[in-house]
Amino acid sequence: MSGEMLFLIYYCGMMVVVGIWANGMLKKEFAKMNSALQQKDKEGISG
Amino acid sequence: MNFFAIGVFTSFLIYLIVGNYAGKLVKNAEDYYVVGRQAPTVLIVGTLVASYLSTVAFMGEVGFVYDGYAIPLLILIALNACGYVIGAVFFGRYLRRSKAMTVTEYFGDRFNSPQLRIVAACITIVGIGAYLVAVTQGASLLMSELIGVNYGWSLVIIWVVYTSFTFYSGSRGVIITDTIMFFIFTVMTFIAVPFLIKASGGWPDAFKTMAVFAEKPDSYAWHGLTGPNNYMGTPTDVLVWGIVLGLVWAAVVAVSPWQSSRYLMAKNEHTTIRSSMVASTTIFALYLILMMTIPLINLLNPNIVPSENAFIWLAMNELPTWLGILVVTGIFAAALSSCSTFLSLVGFSVSRDLIQRSEKLRDKISDDKSLMISRIVMLVVGVVTLIITYFQPPAVMWIGYFAATLFAASMGPITFISIFSKRVTAAGAIWGMLAGFIVVAATEAMSTFGGIAFPVYFRPPILGATASILAIYIASALTKVTPEEKAYREKLFIVPPEEKDPQEIRRTMLFPKILIFGGIALFIIAYVLFFWPISQAV
């Protein structure tokens, strides 16, 4: 494979990798936020 | 006056009208500094990209690519563009949560230290002030060539345009005009590309011819032109140069005040995250499409001197008049958008972080008076900038590069550490900023004035960042975290209730997919448009 093709894979691959990383990281954070909210709701109902 | 000048002056008039209208909407100091924290995604994307791209991109970097370094520049850009997402995720949203008016105010509050705020304000004023001088000079030289008047008058015209709406409307006017300018230069780029391909022989022949162009035979090679008579020595030097500077610029877009301060105006943290991803995608796409096409200008004229004028030469000589006007207007838009953002940031720092720093003083004066003081200070800062720019010898682009690396080294480490370290103290932050600033300033001066060549692995920003990190850890180890510092940091990790709206979360989760699918789409487009014809020729 030529250096130019490797470059194209690196350039566009960076976009894909950053997107996948951000997607996973945000999913995890929002899920944590949701479970904290549900926990609060439960405590509210039982209280 | 020629058609190009008429087009440019018409765009100036639009910015003045819009800026004046935005100024009338400013009701208080919060409006003036951070647009009442109500800016939607489109305005944050507009101001992020517009304040980043200036004459450095459309003249300096275009010239570098015209000279034979398309892929080396793009190696740098791939890392640089990721800085947006990293900056928003690890700093931008916490910065917005701090409710500070300026980035330097955040540092002062985070460490409960007025001294740190003054140090950060001084670095901001010197660094961004220098960048403002360099970009104003670039725009003034361009204006001087366009309408044929001397440099002094061109400088006054450029200065009047951006200062008039910046001082009156503050951030509100700056982000609206930035967004208009962002659309102008983005649209002109994507329209100019097919016209350039057609003018230089059409697709795919133009790329095949350029790939083996005798005068610059390696223009499309991954390492560009290397060897004794070129900028770069060996392909390895090119790779290291691209990666090192790519990381430096990633830090710049992640933490420099002229980028991260944009998040202070965002409507909410979702807007911060979304705009960072759209800005990143825009930079990836705009640079790849533009910079892979620019080498074709060589087929029309391989002897443009200085090469920084390549895009302007193309606009004035080879493109249809209407498109040429759009391109020249777009280049001015890129310059003015950076100037207005830089002026506003320097003005805000002088006004908010130095003059109106004390809460006691702010409590004593009314909001109207505070707004008036801010406007007067902005105008005075503008006049001082005009005087310095007039007497500073023109074409000192190294000032721009110096300012960028200054922020990467002095503010980069402490910015992330201030969020994620429990042990860092005010002393660590002050010494970290000072060490980064002093080492970069000293090594850049040795390199520029003393002719000392630093190896590519030990460039001034790397030395500065290392000194900054060491100073932060040593000074923090010798001092203790105060209860106020601890409490402020803990407050930054409390997610505001309005950020937990499930509908907003669902919408935000769509944005990383723009990057993922954008990357795949860009691969296919770039392969078909550029890399397939190039591979056929070599």
Image (spheres, coloured by chain):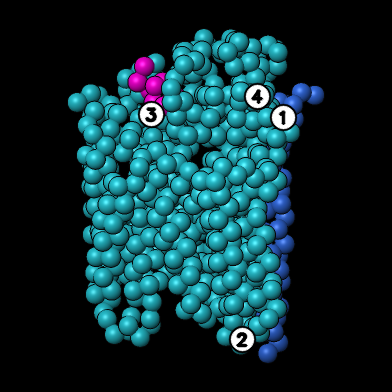
Chain colours: A blue, B cyan
What kind of element bears circle 3? helix
Residue picked out by circle 1:
B235
Q: Which mark is residue B482?
A: 2
What percent of the width, then of the height, locates residue A1? 80, 24
Q: Is B198 on the left-hand or right-hand side of B414?
A: left
What kind of element bears circle 2? loop
Return the chain for callout 4.
Answer: B
Q: Amino acid at mark 4?
A: Pro
Return the chain for callout 3.
Answer: B
Q: Amino acid at mark 3?
A: Val
Name which quarter of the figure residue B212 lies in: top right
What percent of the width, then of the height, locates residue B388? 31, 52
Separation of disc 1 and disc 2 at Cα? Answer: 51 Å
Residue drawn at (28%, 28%), measured in percent from left and top?
Answer: B146
Magenta region, residue range: B309-317
What percent of the width, then of the height, locates residue B296? 53, 18
Query: Which numbered disc, 1 or 2, marks the residue that appears first in the sequence?
Result: 1
| For discs 3 and 1, the disc positioned in front in the rendered view | 1
Residue picked out by circle 3:
B327
Q: Are marks 1 and 2 on the same chain?
A: yes
Residue drawn at (34%, 74%), measured in percent from left and top?
Answer: B355
Q: Quadrant of the C terminus of chain B?
A: top right
What percent of the width, then of the height, locates residue B335? 38, 41
Query: Which numbered disc, 2 or 4, marks the residue that appears first in the sequence?
Result: 4
Separation of disc 3 and disc 1 at Cα? Answer: 33 Å
Camera-nearest residue between B68 and B163: B68
Q: Is B108 on the left-hand or right-hand side of B379?
A: right
Crowding around mark 2 (Cα neighbors within 10 Å: few <14, some 14 to 19, many 20+) is few
| For discs 4 and 3, the disc positioned in front in the rendered view | 4
What kind of element bears circle 4? loop
